[in-house]
Amino acid sequence: MELVERYVAAVQRELPEDKRQEIGRELNANIMDQLDALKEQQGQLSEDDVAAVLKQMGRPRVVAYQFIPPKALVAAEDMPLLKHTLYMVLGVLFVLQVIGATTHWMGSSDGNLIRFLLQLTFGFLDEACFAFTAIVLSFAAVNSSGQRVGRCAGKDWSPKQLPKADLGWQHISLTDVFTDLATYLFLLIVIWHPLWMNPEQITDRSVTFTTDALLMLQWFSPVIVFSVLLSLWQLQQRIWNRGLLLSSIVVNAAFVVFLVVLAFSGPLLQAGPVELKSLFTVLQLEKGFTYGLLITACFPGYEVVRDLWRFNKLN
């Protein structure tokens, strides 16, 4: 039958050349068995009857994939490792991009915040696309060679180290870790960058911290550095334990106290000798900055309460 021959040929075109004849004979025999059974039921078969049987079997490409499933670009066993690698690499790239963009922004003469955000966003997207492509292609190359990237992963572990089943919060998110890292490094650059700025970079339109406010920020820098180390510890552990929770409580409590004290230690900002010709005056910026500090203090305050509750749960 011509329709059957055309159907089998269409399926064979989707198959590797060394498998076409064998699978073609098997498929043809299967179709003929169905047609013979249908012929016994209703007698002579029309072309529409044959077409209905072939349509019920499915498109030729789908049928071909049933015989020889297409090989995945990345092996299913390697997908968890691929996801973890992407999170790690993209997280590091994001932190590095924050450092670079912040340094460039602090060193520019205008200090345009919109330009800083655009540079951060497009710079990260550019590097992230390249990293994503390189990582996926690397996994695909290993998979095409018949090997597994993560074939040795998970050998050195103990069931006794698993967290309790009812404590779903105990897993530390990579997104949270890298977001915290980027925030802390951003703060360190903002605090210490004025010390190595050239005098000509500070223009008469610059708005900077007052001497007292900058001194308070610099004295608080060790706590921020400790926060960076804590984030790296979280990245290594990936599970909340008593030590991590206690350290997080202490750090967040220190941030709450410092932000509240800083908010009421005005003036915090100062302008150059020439009046700032913009949409906002220094006084308005000062007031907004104070409110911003108090609102920001609510976030570590919430984390202190959350971690105290978690610490009690671990007990």
Image (tube, grey):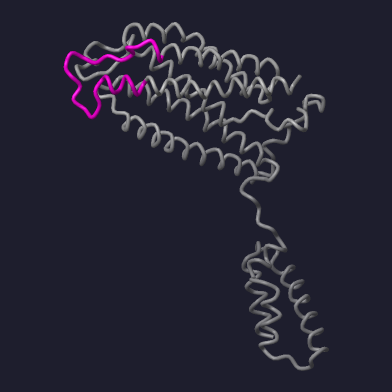
Which quadrant of the structure image shows residue 288? top left
Q: Residue furthest bottom?
A: 44
**Total of numbered circles in the picture?**
0
- Relative height, residue 87 to residue 58 (above, below): above
Residue positioned most to the left: 274
Instruction: Please identify the quadrant where the N terminus is shown.
Output: bottom right
Q: Is residue 197 magenta?
A: no
- The quarter holding residue 274 reads top left
Residue sitting nearer the eye, 243 or 120: 243
Asked if 293 appears above or below 147 in the picture, the reply is: above
In which quarter of the view is residue 111 placed? top left
Residue shown at the point (38%, 6%) measured from the top left:
215
Q: Residue 223 in the image: state x and y as whole percent.
A: 51, 11
Residue 114 position within the rendered picture, expressed as x and y whole percent measured from the top left: 32, 33
Residue 3, x across and y down, in percent: 65, 83
Q: Nearer the viewer, residue 258 or 56?
A: 258
Residue drawn where x is 40% and y is 17% of the image: 189
Image quadrant where one finds the C terminus: top right
Residue 223 shown left or right of residue 46 in the figure = left
Q: Which residues are magenta?
A: 263-289
Q: Position of residue 205 (x, y in %)?
A: 21, 20
> Is 268 in the magenta?
yes
Q: 237 or 218: nearer the eye?
A: 218
Q: Is residue 214 above or below residue 233?
A: above
